Image (cartoon, grey):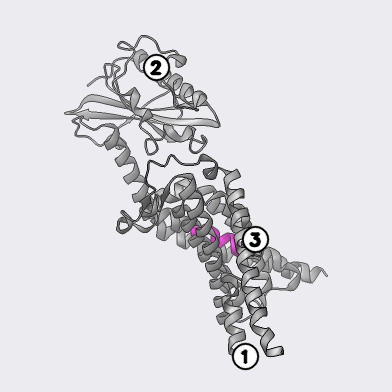
Amino acid sequence: MLQTLVKNTLGLGLLAGLMVAGIGWVDRITQPYIQISKTNQQHRLLADMLTGLRFDNQPLQDKLAVTGLSQGTGYAVRYRRKLVASILPVTAPDGYSGDIHLLLAVKPDGTLLAVRTLAHQETPGIGDGIDIEKSDWITRFNGLSLSNTTNWTAEHFDGLTRATITSRAIVRAVHRALLWHKNQPAQQP
Amino acid sequence: MKSDTTATIWDPIWRNNPALTQFLGLCPMLAVTQTLAQALGLGLATLGVIIGACLSVSAIRYLIPANVRLPAFVIIIAGFVICAMLIMQAFAFNLYQSMALFVQIIVTNCLILGRVELFASKNPLWPTFLDSLMTGLGFILALLLLGALRELIGQGTLGDGLHLLLGPVANDWHIRLPYDYQGFLLFTLPPGAFIGMGLLLALKNKLGSQTHKSATNSHEPRKA
């Protein structure tokens, strides 16, 4: 009885060990491809957000601290070592189905270049219009700033049809990020 | 004799389709068939896992004691699902991101455990390979039918996103319904999946009963 128990346990353990080794091998082979895909995706996103802006550094390697705004990390976009835009991550916790992760591109004077939704769990066909792939709605923030837009109450903005809660969460998060950006000490060139 | 084997081999494609006749694997089927591309992606991942798991179990079937066979099967299936996830992430990253959760859920697909238990654990490699291949293809067929139905009615397109799975060669492989079809949202959401599935099953049963009728009719003259 005990002997069968021990034999079976060892057998299952050996099988599990073999499977883990196999998975480790597949992981090692696929990691380079996955990294390339992830980096490509990030580059495409940044290029999309920064269209028309002249810059000559690698933002993904030029990190900005964003303590007080979000858990992630920001990136600096520079031209001839002067800061021309900050990439800020911000999370809207009050989305319809949970957190919505956004990425903002802000010029040093506080003007928004672009906002993009990185991850969300909003309803397909309704709230997912915040995704640039599904609709242009998120581009309505382009060019806005605290100075040229006085009314930042969420209800004032044209939301996505049938996605009021989602739209307002995003407006609030963008506003919060702009306020944070304004309160930062001026970035040294 | 030969026609018997042929029938058994092709059964899982239609007559004994794992999803439409045996009702296995309905969870992923209802969840990831919003578009044809998603359905195809999940189907291929499931096919890979079925074939891999069945062949592995068949190879070591004499080494697994009967009383721990289920844990052993699940270990093997889970391992293959993780590999499928990694491979999909590496070669179809964007598509993977839209259905990451459901690729992981392939582990719970009773279809795979059922095939492994019923067939792979008792048969040699070649028949196991054929059986798992046919079952996987039958599942893909069911997924594609529901996916096409839901995408066409729900979004008005067919093949949206195929390039994420098949690469740039498929950039133009999609069609869009004319007349500014707005899309019937219900079919993109889960209730529509259930309704679509029900319609598909009704259609299959109707077709099945018709072939049965024509078979009986052709026999009668001989009896007389």
Q: Amino acid at mark 3?
A: Leu
Report whether A147 appears left or right of A80: right
Q: Which residue is mark 3?
A: B24
**Relative height, residue A93 to residue A48 (above, below):** above
| Magenta stretch bounds | B74-84
Q: Amino acid at mark 1?
A: Met
Q: Residue furthest left?
A: A80
Spatial CA distance of label 1 from label 3 is 29 Å
Spatial CA distance of label 1 from label 2 is 78 Å
Magenta stretch holds residue A124: no
**Relative height, residue A49 to residue A189 (above, below):** below
Check disc 2 and report its element: helix, strand or loop.
Answer: helix
Q: Nearer the viewer, mark 1 or mark 3?
A: 1
Q: Nearer the viewer, mark 2 or mark 3?
A: 3
Please name the residue shown 41% across and 20% down the image: A158
Q: Position of residue A130 (x, y in %)?
A: 42, 32
